[in-house]
Amino acid sequence: MHGTDRSAERAPSKSNAAPVTVERITHQDVPEICALYRRVWEAPGDAAGVPNELVKSWQPTPLEFTSWMEGVTYFAARREGRLLGVVGCEVAHGNCHLLHLAVEPDARRAGVASALVAAGVEWAKHASAVEVWADALARFPAAVALFKHLGFTECGVLHKHEWNEDVRLFERIL
Ligand SMILES: CC(C)(COP(=O)(O)OP(=O)(O)OC[C@H]1O[C@@H](n2cnc3c(N)ncnc32)[C@H](O)[C@@H]1OP(=O)(O)O)[C@@H](O)C(=O)NCCC(=O)NCCS
């Protein structure tokens, strides 16, 4: 991951499937990434009960996503070229915030988010950050389980923080 813009990181696959590859995104990837966010947040289940304002804000247009990319490094996970997931890493003040993490509904529980978070941790170390942190709506059990599984400590709750939704905070000291 270090040194070049798009060098690949490979995560072990859980089955006989081809390995997941994680790379920094380029502007060429933007339409595909926006389509992935749309599929994730239109899927039955993930957005259940989430205020519409939030669901909409997580489905950027290509133009909106391009502005998300300012100051944020995004990584994409692929298997055999197919985009499976995305995460953003925003390094500031010696810490790295993971944001906009999402995995294709039909590619879950196969280590894709784990590979993306691992890439984010490597990126944070590369940028001399000493802490990685993330937030998730309290109503998202999969995200909460993921961060705990990956060694993050829950360090707080912001009550009614985003459109009346509680947000849980997770940190991992590097
Ligand atoms: C949360 C999310 C990113 C997890 O992606 P994923 O690729 O399925 O996660 P992984 O396969 O790397 O999971 C690693 C571990 O996290 C935990 N985990 C992940 N999803 C879980 C779930 N639905 N229920 C319980 N534990 C879960 C498990 O311990 C899992 O290991 P295991 O499969 O060996 O039991 C995915 O469910 C998603 O995109 N959800 C909708 C968007 C979202 O909530 N984004 C996060 C906002 S911060």
Image: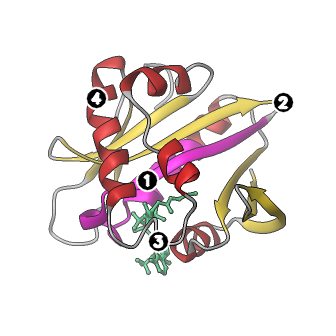
91 or 18: nearer the viewer: 91
Percent of width and height locating residue 7: 36, 28
Which residue is the site of mark 2?
Answer: 93
Per the image, label 1 sits on a secondary structure element best described as: strand
Disc 2 crowd rating (10 Å Cα; few below 14, some 14-19, many 20+) is few
Q: Are marks 4 and 1 in contact (CB under 8 Å)?
A: no
Question: Magenta part of the protein: which range?
Answer: 95-121
Quarter location, residue 13: bottom left
Indicate which label's residue lies in the foreground, 3 or 1: 3
Which comes sooner in the sequence, label 2 or label 1?
2
| Of the two numbered discs 4 and 1 in the rendering, the one whose residue sits closer to the viewer | 4
Residue in view at x 43 percent, y 67 percent: 46
> In terms of depth relative to the viewer, which is nearer, 56 or 105?
56
Residue placed at 65% from the left, 37% from the top?
Answer: 124
Q: Is mark 1 within 8 Å of ligand 1?
A: yes
Residue matched to label 3: 48
Mark 2: which amino acid?
A: His
Residue 98's place in the image compared with 164, above or below, is: above
Mark 3 to mark 1 CA distance (whole Å)? 15 Å
- Which three-letter amino acid code belongs to the residue tagged 3? Ala
Q: CA distance from mark 4 to mark 2?
A: 31 Å
